Image (cartoon, helix red, strand yellow):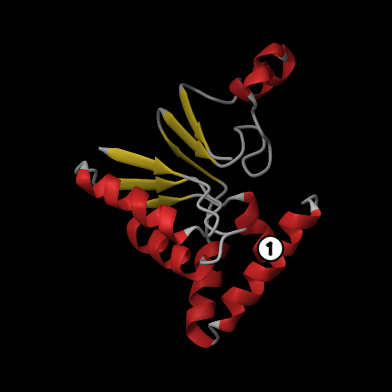
């Protein structure tokens, strides 16, 4: 059986609770749909745990913003990204390098027919949101779901 997790945002306590629940159910595969970091106080620990326990991890928009530039983020999210960068760098040496390398190698999407795994949407795997009210936007739905063969799992 497979568990899908997403949007951890550096929240170590929540991640530990979710992983304990996953273990208690005998689930043996974990897919993470991104945003391991951003906002929460424990980005290093969360990266370490996800890199150890998740069989598949997808890049999230906050992960990418920490790697490159938080373009388009609101002021609070931008401050959180800069804080996260400093926190990751403060480990220094090979530990910091290992974590940056892990984030830098994450794919934007993963296909395992008949499944598609993304953080955002099938059309924009990193940044696009799909809200419940979008069902009334026929054009958006047709464009996004025209890219999905059968099943799509997304974060945000």
SS class of the residue under badge 1? helix
Using residue 65 as the reference point, say whether residue 122 is left or right of it: left
Res. 92 visible in picture: yes
Using residue 124 as the reference point, say whether residue 117 is left or right of it: left
Q: Nearer the viewer, residue 149 or 138?
A: 138
For the point 51% across and 49% down, the residue is: 58
Check the image and report above or below for 140 versus 24.
Answer: above
For the point 54% across and 63% down, the residue is: 103
**Residue position marked by numbered label 1 in the rendering:** 81
Res. 68 visible in picture: no
For the point 32% across and 51% down, the residue is: 19
Q: Position of residue 87 (x, y in %)?
A: 60, 75
Check the image and report above or below for 15 versus 93.
Answer: above
Using residue 14 as the reference point, say whether residue 145 is left or right of it: right
Check the image and report above or below for 143 versus 12.
Answer: above
For the N terminus, give its image quadrant.
top left
| Quarter of the rendering containing residue 62 | bottom right
Check the image and report above or below for 52 versus 134.
Answer: below
| Quarter of the rendering containing residue 68 | bottom right
Q: Nearer the viewer, residue 122 or 89?
A: 89
Badge 1: residue crowd in 10 Å (few <14, some 14–19, many ≥20): many
Q: Position of residue 111 (x, y in %)?
A: 46, 38
For the point 49% across and 57% down, the residue is: 11
């Amino acid at each position: 059986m497979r568990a899908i997790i997403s949007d951890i945002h550096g929240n170590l306590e929540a991640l530990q609770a979710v992983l304990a629940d996953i273990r208690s159910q005998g689930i043996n595969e974990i897919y993470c749909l991104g945003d391991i970091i951003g906002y929460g106080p424990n980005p290093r620990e969360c990266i370490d745990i996800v890199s150890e326990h998740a069989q598949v991890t997808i890049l999230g928009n906050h992960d990418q913003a920490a790697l490159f530039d938080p373009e388009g983020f609101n002021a609070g999210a931008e401050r959180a990204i800069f804080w996260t960068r400093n926190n990751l760098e403060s480990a220094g040496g090979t530990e910091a390098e290992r974590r940056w390398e892990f984030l830098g190698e994450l794919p934007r999407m993963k296909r395992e027919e008949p499944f598609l795994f993304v953080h955002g949407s099938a059309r924009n795997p990193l940044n696009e949101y799909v809200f419940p009210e979008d069902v009334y936007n026929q054009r958006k739905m047709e464009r996004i779901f025209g890219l999905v063969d059968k099943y799509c799992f997304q974060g945000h």
